[in-house]
Amino acid sequence: MKVVLLKDVKGSGKAGDIIEAKDGFAQNFLIKKGLAKPADNQALNENKAQKQAQEFHRQEQLKANKELRQKLDGTEITIQVKSGASGKFFGSVTNKEVADKLLELGYDIDKKKITIQSNIKTAGVYPATVRISAEETAKISVNIIN
């Protein structure tokens, strides 16, 4: 019996998949528990429309991520930090400070998505990477001044 899965079913498939299941399993377990519905023409058409909508939204998200990467790539942010007489900082500059500075510039980036290669404890320009998505990463420069 062909059914359209409404929820993920371990060992059978993910939500939206059309599977061939044994009649007893489909009737007594999948359909009875609301995990699937029979694959009639209406269910197949709804499933097709849902998949098209999901693909459209995925493409829109990819496009938005690419635009954000292009805007961020090469951006230089400047962070002013207090330091001691020897030029060493009291602590170090972290991802949070970089994320806060990016937020001031209008980019809402989670601090967990920012990677700085080394601990920033002295003034200078440091490279950083911003992971926008699995496919898109932007390289920025962090300029630290006293």
Image: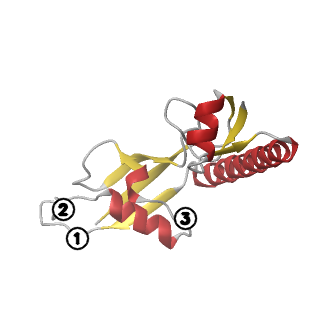
Residue 138 placed where, x, y %? Answer: 54, 46
Q: Secondary structure at mark 2?
A: loop
The residue that mark 3 highlights is 107
Residue 82 placed where, x, y %? Answer: 22, 70
Amino acid identity at mark 2? Phe
Distance Cα–Cα, label 3 vs label 2: 26 Å
**Nearer the observer, disc 3 or disc 2?**
3
Q: Identify the residue at image location x=53%, y=38%.
A: 9
Q: Identify the residue at image location x=68%, y=51%.
A: 61
Distance Cα–Cα, label 2 vs label 1: 6 Å
Question: Pointers 2 and 1 in contact (CB under 8 A)?
Answer: yes
Crowd around label 2: few <14 · some 14–19 · many ≥20 (10 Å): some
Question: Pointers 3 and 2 in contact (CB under 8 A)?
Answer: no
Residue nearest the viewer, comparing 56 with 129: 56
Q: Identify the residue at image location x=41%, y=68%.
A: 100
The residue that mark 2 highlights is 89
